[in-house]
């Protein structure tokens, strides 16, 4: 018998090269005229903000802009953006233009800019309740999938810990997937974000809380990402692969939004947070050993997922090793080895990881702190 489930998805999704330039028509369609763009210095420096806001301006729409979103944003970043949004006056739609940090910040701005609620008090599940402003997301990386989800991840500045804000009202109204915006991404960013997207699909597929819709989306994500990730790492100018990466990461985002991420992400958050390692480097490298742990519960699923990735018939027991080889072949293991993580810190990381029940409970098998330490140690010592 099927368990009860619910699914939350963005209301409207458009994909296409150059589609971000159609934001004007989309805003008119939504009856909105005063956009507030949330972005960061990297997106601005790459010329993408001028690209999008220029098109609005040519159509007579002047956007207000907050361009100081921080990486791994603290809640104070939402507060700063809210002040700018209120100063702009008359804002009726929030437009996120950027990667995961930007999109996460924009979600909370759309929910709190008007009523002035403190975003830090909304951490947890279902505490946001309402979002007064419309929300449009235009991702500029292919990985986080945040444009498809009801989650924002923030850093609690008092503890340094990552905390999640999860509420169905944070799912965007409109997503514009324009792969042109991802064409110039640097190689390590491309590889890390792409591997993170594969991990999203994999964890969504095996999660105990996966819905039938999420499992279908996860397999389709794997079909896009499996061939595209090695291709785009070999040739960053491969536009067909860039297209497939963006679609795949979005499908993976919709998948984990309606299942969950699991132990890889529970282990990755404290390690990445404490040692400031790029999220996709950490999740990509931790996946192999975590899947070895999950193997007794996931044999058939691993075989099906490997087939979807385009790997053909892979014996379930070989699957974790193949995931590790992929992370190594796109340079992530080397990137991980460049950070010194003392062995003495592993016990504390493992404690934090296992305490993250939001991500550990959906994992196919339980994990003890001792097992988590073993996974960290073997991952950190693996050959680059
Ligand atoms: Fe992730």
Image: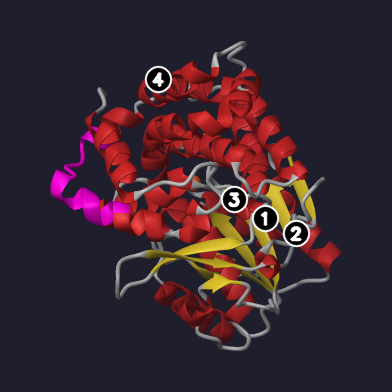
Image check: 36 left or right of 40? right
- Dot 1, how many residues are within 10 Å of its Cα: few (below 14), some (14-19), or many (20+)? some
- Dot 4, how many residues are within 10 Å of its Cα: few (below 14), some (14-19), or many (20+)? some
Label 3: state its secondary structure.
Answer: loop
The residue that mark 2 highlights is: 24
Whether residue 11 is situated above or below residue 216 in the rendered picture: below
Mark 2 or 3: in front is 3
- Dot 2, how many residues are within 10 Å of its Cα: few (below 14), some (14-19), or many (20+)? many
x, y (%) of residue 369?
A: 32, 50
Looking at the image, tell me whether mark 2 or mark 1 is earlier in sequence order. 2
x, y (%) of residue 120?
A: 46, 78
Determine whether label 2 and label 1 are within 8 Å by CB.
yes
Looking at the image, tell me whether mark 4 or mark 2 is earlier in sequence order. 2
Label 1: state its secondary structure.
Answer: helix
Chain part drawn in magenta: 336-350
Disc on res. 55: 1
Determine whether label 4 and label 2 are within 8 Å by CB.
no
x, y (%) of residue 77?
A: 43, 73
Label 4: state its secondary structure.
Answer: helix
């Amino acid at each position: 018998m099927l368990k009860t489930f619910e699914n939350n998805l963005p209301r409207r999704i458009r994909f296409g090269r150059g589609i971000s330039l159609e934001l004007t028509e989309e805003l008119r369609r939504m009856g909105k005229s005063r956009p507030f763009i949330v972005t960061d210095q990297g997106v601005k420096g790459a010329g993408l903000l001028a690209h999008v806001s220029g098109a609005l301006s040519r159509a007579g729409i002047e956007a207000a802009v907050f361009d100081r979103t921080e990486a791994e944003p603290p809640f104070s970043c939402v507060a700063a953006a809210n002040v700018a949004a209120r100063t702009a006056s008359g804002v009726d739609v929030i437009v996120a233009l950027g990667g995961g940090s930007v999109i996460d910040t924009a979600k909370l701005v759309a929910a709190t800019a008007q009523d002035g609620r403190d975003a830090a008090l909304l951490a947890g599940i279902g505490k946001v309740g309402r979002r007064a402003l419309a929300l449009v997301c235009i991702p500029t990386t292919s990985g986080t999938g945040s444009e498809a989800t009801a989650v924002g991840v923030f850093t609690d500045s008092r503890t340094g810990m990552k905390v999640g804000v999860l509420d169905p009202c944070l799912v965007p109204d409109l997503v514009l997937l324009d792969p042109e915006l991802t064409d110039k991404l640097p190689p390590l960013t491309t590889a890390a974000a792409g591997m993170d997207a594969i991990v999203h699909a994999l964890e969504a597929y095996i999660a105990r809380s996966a819905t039938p819709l999420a499992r279908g989306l996860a397999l389709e994500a794997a079909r896009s990402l499996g061939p595209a990730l090695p291709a785009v790492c070999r040739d960053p100018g491969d536009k067909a692969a860039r297209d497939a990466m963006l679609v795949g990461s979005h499908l993976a985002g919709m998948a984990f939004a309606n299942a969950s991420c699991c132990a890889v992400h529970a282990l990755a958050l404290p390690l990445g947070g404490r040692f400031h390692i790029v999220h996709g480097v950490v999740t990509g490298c931790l996946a192999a050993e975590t899947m070895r742990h999950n193997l007794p519960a996931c044999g058939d699923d691993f075989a099906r997922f490997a087939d979807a990735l385009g790997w053909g018939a892979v014996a379930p027991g070989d699957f974790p090793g193949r995931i590790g080889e992929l992370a190594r072949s796109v340079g992530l293991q080397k990137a991980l080895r460049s950070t010194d993580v003392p062995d003495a810190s592993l016990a504390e990381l493992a404690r934090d990881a296992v305490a993250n029940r939001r991500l550990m409970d959906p994992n196919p098998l339980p994990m003890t702190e001792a097992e988590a330490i073993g996974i960290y140690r073997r991952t950190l010592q693996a050959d680059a």
